[in-house]
Amino acid sequence: MDKLFIPILLGTTRPKRESFKAAKLIEKIGRSIDTIEVQLVDPGDYNFPFDGNDPENKDPRYSALTQRADGFFIVTPEYNHSFPGTLKRMLDSELRNYVHKPVAFAGVSNGIFGGARAIESLVHTVREMGMVVTFSDVYFPQIQNTFDEKGELLDQGYIKRIERAYAELIWMAKALKYGRDNLGGPYHS
Ligand SMILES: Cc1cc2nc3c(=O)[nH]c(=O)nc-3n(C[C@H](O)[C@H](O)[C@H](O)COP(=O)(O)O)c2cc1C
């Protein structure tokens, strides 16, 4: 079986974003799993000039990677008890490419809730896009205390938590890929 392709979507372009460290860790652990290929997607490297999914708001590289994706790992900081507008704009730029694909979440905050409210508010959005949510979220509370000044992880417990999230995402990705490839229906020819 080919490797499953899992883009890791980072939710913010904020210049001093701490969530980048969480996304890099998730990318690193993803690279150690030999059944998947991961790619960190930094919205700052893509171009979504408008809201919506009109052709003018599509970045062909994002279109291609979402089409190829077998699942997604979204890493979102919490901004005012929700997820950043950048993430919404990026997600909104596509439609059919998400249907019947699973998504895992990591939330990031400098407070104690680890982005839980950002994840909760994302569930409604990704459901409308046809994605299937996993239930092993990874929470990064107090992200400013999670890595040292060299960017090294201070609490090794995150590794197991991230591996658990991947394990469920991979299970779902396999099941849904089987469905997309074999069960037909209006979204998969
Ligand atoms: C516009 C904005 C709103 C924020 N709102 C919240 C919030 O509602 N809850 C929270 O725990 N942290 C909030 N924070 C702090 C983030 O948790 C903090 O920036 C953290 O480092 C993760 O985001 P980052 O990747 O931007 O660094 C907010 C930060 C910004 C920039």
Image (tube, rainbow, N blue to C red):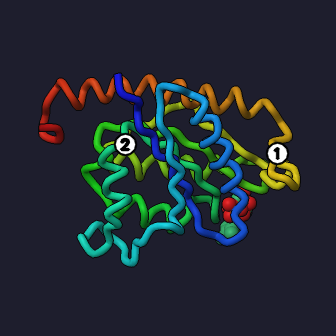
Residue closest to the eye, 6 or 50: 6
Query: Up-down: is 57 above or below 136?
Result: below
The quadrant of the image that shows the C terminus is top left
Q: Position of residue 46 (x, y in %)?
A: 45, 67
Residue name at image x 25 percent, y 26 percent: 179
Mark yes or no: residue 185 visible: yes
Query: Up-down: is 49 above or below 72?
Result: below
User: Which of the 4 image quadrants contains residue 103?
Assistant: top left
Position of 20 with respect to 99 (left or right) is right
The quadrant of the image that shows the N terminus is top left
Q: Residue furthest bottom?
A: 49
The tag on residue 69 is 2
The tag on residue 84 is none
Numbered disc 1: secondary structure: loop
User: Which of the 4 image quadrants contains residue 101?
Assistant: top left
Residue name at image x 41 percent, y 38 percent: 5
Numbered disc 2: secondary structure: loop
Q: Amino acid at mark 2?
A: Ala
Which of the two discs, 2 and 1, labels the residue nearer the N terminus?
A: 2
Q: Amino acid at mark 1?
A: Glu
Which residue, given by chain and number where applicable, does mark 1 sit on?
152
